[in-house]
Image: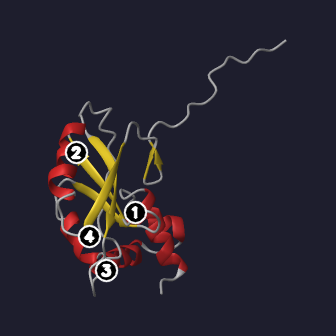
Amino acid sequence: MLDSKEKQILKILERDAKVTPEKIATMIGMTEEEVSAKIKEFEDKKIIVQYKTIIDWEKAEEEVVYAFIDVKVVPERNVGFDAVAKRIYKFPEVHSLYLLSGTYDLSVVVEGKSMKEIAFFVAEKLATIDHVQGTISHFVLKKYKIDGQVLEPEEGDKRLAVTP
């Protein structure tokens, strides 16, 4: 079980992976060496899985289309949904994959260059997998917040102050 300082390190890095161990040490009252050792330990134990940058591809003028594909699956004996999930997450088009409760069993986030490309992925690869009973697609029209980061933060009040 992690102590409170270890959890603080993880939360700081989750918000901003570029924060240096020196700055984290200052923020939580540890030495830089202690923080660096903890980060290395977290990486070795795969508690820190990956460092990631959130890109607003629209601002970078790169066409990227995302869709949430809900998938209804017949679970397999002894492995449940895992075997089907493993087949699905191996496709390079799959950005994320989640097991859900509710009407559909899996939610697949698919990335492509166009809606047509994603539609072909669903029709030719995803829907043809054994044990997949059905899919429903939801295309992302606009992203407001990703992994806790607001893409277009509200600007402050730009009105001029009027004094009598």
Q: Which mark is residue 16?
A: none
Residue 30, horizontal then vertical, whole percent: 48, 75
Q: Are marks 1 and 4 in contact (CB under 8 Å)?
A: no
Q: Which residue is mark 2?
A: 118
5 to the left or right of 72: right
Q: Between marks 1 and 2, how big is the CA–CA gap?
A: 19 Å
Which one is in front, 53 or 31? 53
Q: Earlier in the sequence, mark 1 or mark 4?
A: 4
- Name the residue tied to disc 4: 85
Which residue is rendered at x = 25% and y = 38% of the image? 115
**Quarter containing the C terminus:** top right
Q: Residue at x 45, y 70 (%)?
A: 9
Q: Amino acid at mark 1?
A: Tyr
Assess whether mark 2 and mark 3 are in contact (beta carbons under 8 angstroms).
no
Q: Which one is earlier in the sequence, the residue at label 1 or at label 2?
A: 1
Q: Secondary structure at mark 3?
A: loop
Determine whether 45 is above or below 96 in the image.
below
User: Tag 4: residue type?
Assistant: Ala
Q: Which residue is mark 3?
A: 80
Q: Alpha-carbon neighbours of circle 3 within 10 Å: few (<14), some, or many (≥20)? A: few
